[in-house]
Amino acid sequence: MASKQHSIKPVDSRPDFVKQENELLDKWYKNGITEKYLNKNNNKTKTFSFIDGPITANNPMGVHHAWGRTYKDLWQRYKNMQGYKQRFQNGFDCQGLWVEVEVEKDLKFKTKKDIEDYGVEKFVQKCKDRVIKYAKIQTEQSKRLGYLMDWDNSYYTMSDANNYMIWNFLKICHKNGWLYKGNDSVPWCPRCQTAISQHEMLTEDYKEVIHDSIYLSLPLVDHDNEFLLIWTTTPWTIPANIAVAIDPKIKYILVQKEKNRYWIAKDLKDKIFDNKDKVVRTVLGKDLVGLQYQAPFDSLPAVKKVANANKATFHTVIATDPLIMPITMTDGTGLVHTAVSAGTEDFKLGKKYNLPMVPIIADDASYLEDLGFLTGQNAKKHPEIILNYLKEQDKKGLNWVFKISPFKHRYPVCWRCKTELVWKVTDEWYIAMDRGEPSLRQRMQAVTKKINWIPKFGLKRELDWLTNMHDWLISKKNRYWGLCLPIWECECGNFEVIGGKEELETKAVKGWDQFKGHTPHKPHIDKIKIKCTKCGKLAFRVEPVGNPWLDAGIVPFSTLNYTQDPQYFKKWFPADFITESFPGQFKNWFYSLIATSAVLENKPSFKNVLGHANMLDSHGKTFHKSAGNSIEFIDGANRFSADVIRWYCALQNPAREMCFGEKEANQTKRQFHMFLWNSYRFFVNYAALENWQPKEEYINNPTVLDQWILTRLDQVVLKTTANLDKFNAFSGAKAIEEFVTDFSTWYIRRSRDRVGPNAQNQADKNTCYQTFFTVLETLSRLLMPYTPFLADSIYTNLTGQESVNLADWPSKPVIKNINKKLLDQMILIRKICEQGHAQRKVHQLAVKQPLSSLTIKINDSLALEDSKALLQLIKEELNIEKVIFKQDNQFSVELDTTLTPDLIKKRQARETIRLIQQARKEANCKLDQVVNITLPDWPKKYEAQIKQKTLVKTITKGKHVKLSF
Ligand SMILES: [Zn+2]
Ligand SMILES: [Zn+2]
């Protein structure tokens, strides 16, 4: 409640919200308000555990970061008001390719060799420095959003604690028999020279590109002029061809074109051949299996070697496994080029049929040794070398090229540097999903089902991903800045996984002194050698760094002191709540969180997850620096106001993408912030003028209108609370928005005569003011989690308290029971008034013209006729003298439009009042100043009423309107 000395101050009609926000931030941080906020519930027992999904500390925040960060702040603020103790820990994601790529750009590096020449230690330090720099910038930006966290206690995924906790996790995976080194054909970025895991291939990481596709004819062995027709969009993989796959169940045809005959799927004939090209044979796919063919690169030494060693399987037709590589009839020929070393499905099919492979490219996508003229040339940079070679061959009388045509398709690119990916065979480290009983996949599925997913479809998405995902590729070759996998491998093939720093110290037989005092990163960690437990030789740490999602996935364990302080861990684990954007996180953060907790605790590390879609620009396009539409967060906040951004974000349905920009910001400001501000200003300017002080007992005798708005207030408090409890911000925000509209367009509209110096009934005025005060004070607390700046400026002006950040959530209802009947009655009244106004419009009768009666035909009048006060609202709103109810099934409203001389006089009285008020305004009269006036004419019958309403002492007749004092 207000302190005795506090007086409410008037406010501007055109507030500068941005300026106000910056001033409030200054106050919050300088006056220790944030400290008080963070420590408000220190001695409470109930806890709310929030785990922050770390933001990549690699660039300044964009305005699109505001959505998730608004949610994060919103629920922590809400729970703080409700008295829950919290940790308020923000997190920064630090390690990985994304940072390396930016540092490489800064240093103008083109290749991996540039890093080696520069020095790994210096490069890693640059990465650390970059993270620290942007963590500071993001902290300042987050503060500008009004996001209150324990900023000095943020966690960093590059910390020793985080890295060693992952070691612990990997060691347990190894104990369970899940960690293995596998050989696979994986998506690979030739620029970053590293594997891209299945997790990292997001839908947005595809580019629409045009590649030259080729229809290639492969001559069958022992069938003259007969060819298999295959089609590929990646001609660079042709030297890796091992087999041609067909679907054994569908029909294939042999088509005669000029002197040659080609095998293709029957359904694709019209796409490839003319009508005049005749079908000479039709068979089922299975009849083609086992046929042998020749391919254009058979003379290259590496290919020859494989061919000689695998005479039975090399270059044969095989039946596909539709679960691995389904053959579609949309493009191509129905015969699929199978390059075992250069495709995920190809590799799997090769494994199934025990096919050999010809590895063709190195880490940078240049062709390997023993590939003749191709060796050393770059497969991706110069795709034309393959096609040119084939064309040259054909000039010599061969028949390789059937057709070359440009093909537009969505092609995967590196999620960091946007280079087109290739597929290559490599040794990588994996966590097996299906070993043991229960397997990791089964454990993760069970854990996933125990989580409350918001929106609901999240559960299905995560389970779909878990059902289909391959073993988890956790290594990244050729990279420098990241988790160093704790795997020490011996040349005998044995490997050991180290679970932490102490264990490493015990097992190190070499290099500990050089490592001591350094973080577990390259290059220092690689100095350490351990002894192979099998053969006794020295074991070396494996070269790759780890998948960055391990870094973020281990956070609940590293930040909650899993191994060091079980008591503390138990108190805060599992988290009550996490929130992050949906796209991508099913495969990434959510996935890795579930993996770590399934392994370490066999239960979820979070109970509720709120996912949200992406924020796009006003035109529905993704924000991109290169597209020129990105808005840096600080610019956004200082252009639109942080509260406007927050409110807009809170109003969105998280399941759908949102569009945001200048237009949306201005509209939000107009429709909510200014609307609320004007209602608030209406009250505080009168309260300030009359030096009014709130007193709870003023509200003891409320009018029906007061009762109604206070009931609505209780209703909106309950609604917002219930929705926020369900982690639904937007239904809460909508309820508040509707309330503010009701307050302004009905309560204030119908209360104007009750307030201000002209109002005579002091008791009623106090009741009305106190109602205003109660509504606005409660509303400011309801808005605190949503729009803390606006809430704080209203709350502190009304109450004189230090800050809304330290206030409690409204929990006690103002009215004991929600009066449902009154709410319904008011809805009906407003409907009647709406129709009454419509009728006045039809008859061109302005509201200032009083009318004698209104007849309401209605089936159920909700007993309106029994309440004088409610009827009075209709009478005043529509300016009529009598309301008549008639029972009727058909609802209608009928005005008596007859104008009697007295009704006309009454209108003149009203007009006179308006005239005088206008004159007062023009003369800059104070609201409580009594004046005299000269008028040409006025209805004498209503003189007393006119005088009273306009604070006029005497009226004299004269030619012109004239005010005197
Ligand atoms: Zn890349
Ligand atoms: Zn060994």
Image: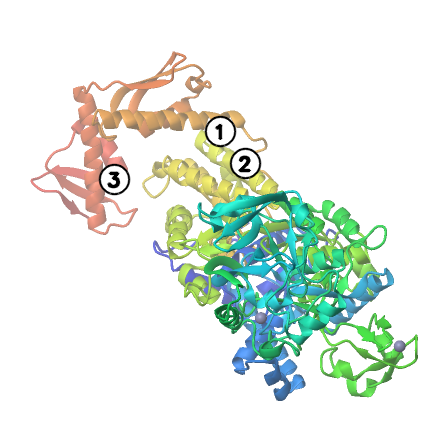
Name the secondary structure under disc 2: helix
Ligand 2: quadrant of the figure: bottom right
* Circle 3 residue: 950
* Circle 2 residue: 715
* Circle 1 residue: 823
Name the secondary structure under disc 3: helix
Name the secondary structure under disc 1: helix
Label 1 to label 3: alpha-carbon separation: 34 Å
Establish if 884 lies above or below 770: above
Q: Which mark is residue 480?
A: none
Residue at (42% x, 35% y) in the render: 764
Amino acid beneath label 1: Leu
Task: Evaluate whether residue 778 shows in this view.
Answer: no
Amino acid beneath label 3: Thr
Nearer to me, 954 or 77: 77
In this rendering, the label closer to the viewer, 2 or 3: 2
Residue at (59% x, 60% y) in the render: 218
Amino acid beneath label 2: Gln
Q: Is disc 1's CB within 8 Å of ligand 1?
A: no
Label 2 to label 1: alpha-carbon separation: 10 Å
Nearer to me, 395 or 562: 395
Whole-percent x, y for residue 702 in the image:
48, 33
In this rendering, the label closer to the viewer, 1 or 3: 1
